[in-house]
């Protein structure tokens, strides 16, 4: 039997999408102040989700493959065992829609999403052409949640003193998904920007995951004042560092969403591989400067164009 106090939220990833869901997470928590709210997500976002305070529990979706029957049965048993009265599917993918079917047969919980037959469907025919924030606001409005705030990371706490970084500094995020090289501006041009920042007494700080250590090392080798923190920061540390950053520059990649939400003036580079109308980072108050530069092929985006945007955002004269 479903419990009226049991709520499930589904948001599996990626990082940028997860960050853009922080506002909806907060709205769901406010709308159900006494409920036990569980998040179903993937392992990389567990610590961030727990730190947010929006959830009473966080479940990890192992994302079984089609042929992993045992994995699907275990997931079905867990979902049904949660006795959820309502599900907010913020992933709204074919996979998460299939989870709605897994909860049958019999009466399924109230479901906000796009799964066929769900109780609170998002029927906007333009939902795939609007920004994630507006899309999720409209989805939640249809489920009775009218007030969805701009996401923020004011709750993020992390130790960063050991990095010994003092303002003024700039954050540089030269990487991105390894299978999407078309979303990356050439690392040699990031090196040029780092050198220009250093010439203006702004320390370049390079961020990225383990897979981007080579990018950080390349920039640091060519620009001695640069600090290479690739592979050394978690998500909350990125947010904390962003609060005091003079400016941030990066590709269309997850950490730039965290950085913008933490309040750093940001310059984000887009190729034709993604659409800033739907996925551009936004600041915590809707007003924090986020400058988008787009070229179909990022190799055609000149270093002078990028520097002009970085210098303006950082108020470098």
Image (cartoon, grey):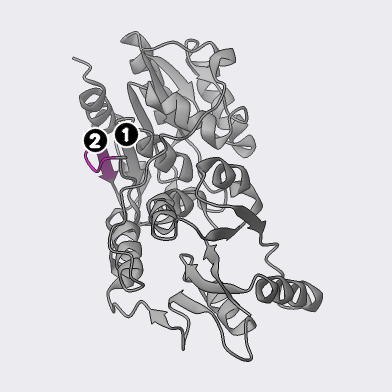
Label 2 secondary element: loop
- Can residue 185 be spotted in the picture? no
Residues at marks 1 and 2 touching, judged by CB atoms closer than 8 Å = yes
Q: The magenta stretch spans which residues?
A: 285-293
Image quarter hosting the N terminus: bottom right
- Residue at 35 percent of width and 63 percent of height: 136
Question: Is 298 rendered above or below residue 189?
Answer: below
Specify which label sits upstream in the sequence, 1 or 2.
Answer: 1
| Total numbered circles | 2
Question: Is 209 rendered above or below residue 81?
Answer: above
Q: Nearer the viewer, residue 146 or 213?
A: 146
Quadrant assignment, res 269: top left
Label 1 secondary element: strand
Binning the other alpha carbons within 10 Å of mark 2 as few (below 14), some (14 to 19) or many (20 upward) gives some
The image position of residue 16, as x and y in percent, is 45, 49
Determine whether, in the image, residue 256 is placed left or right of residue 109: left
Say which residue label 1 marks: 266
Binning the other alpha carbons within 10 Å of mark 1 as few (below 14), some (14 to 19) or many (20 upward) gives many
- Residue at 40 percent of width and 34 percent of height: 154
Say which residue label 2 marks: 289
Q: Nearer the viewer, residue 83 or 284?
A: 83
How far, Cα to Cα, is label 1 from label 2? 6 Å
The image position of residue 12, as x and y in percent, is 56, 60
């Amino acid at each position: 039997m479903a419990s009226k106090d049991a709520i499930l939220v589904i948001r599996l990833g990626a990082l940028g999408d997860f960050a853009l869901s922080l506002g909806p997470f907060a709205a769901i928590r406010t709308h159900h102040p006494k409920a036990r709210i569980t998040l179903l997500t993937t392992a990389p976002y567990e610590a961030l989700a727990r730190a947010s305070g929006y959830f009473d529990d966080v479940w990890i979706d192992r994302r079984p493959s089609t042929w992993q029957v045992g994995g699907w049965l275990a997931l079905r048993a867990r979902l049904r065992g949660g006795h959820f009265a309502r599900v907010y599917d913020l992933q709204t993918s074919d996979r998460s829609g299939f989870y709605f079917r897994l909860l049958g047969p019999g009466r399924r919980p109230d479901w906000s999403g796009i799964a066929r037959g769900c109780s609170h469907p998002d029927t906007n025919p333009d939902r795939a052409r609007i920004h994630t924030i507006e899309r999720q606001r409209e989805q939640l409005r249809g489920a009775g949640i009218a007030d969805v705030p701009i996401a923020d990371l004011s709750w993020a706490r992390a130790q960063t003193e050991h990095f010994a970084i003092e303002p003024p500094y700039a954050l540089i995020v030269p990487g991105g998904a390894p299978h999407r090289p078309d979303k990356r501006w050439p690392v040699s041009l990031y090196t040029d920007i780092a050198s220009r920042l250093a010439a203006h007494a702004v320390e370049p700080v390079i961020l990225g995951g383990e897979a981007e250590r080579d990018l950080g090392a390349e920039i640091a080798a060519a620009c001695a004042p640069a600090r290479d923190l690739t592979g050394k920061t978690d998500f909350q540390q990125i947010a904390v560092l962003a609060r005091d950053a003079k400016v941030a520059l990066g590709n269309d990649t997850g950490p730039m969403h965290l950085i913008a939400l933490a309040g750093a003036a940001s310059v984000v580079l887009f190729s034709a591989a993604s659409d800033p109308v739907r996925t551009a980072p936004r600041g915590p108050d809707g007003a924090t400067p986020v400058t988008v530069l787009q070229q179909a092929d990022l190799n055609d985006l000149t270093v002078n164009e990028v520097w002009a945007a970085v210098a303006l955002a950082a108020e470098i004269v």
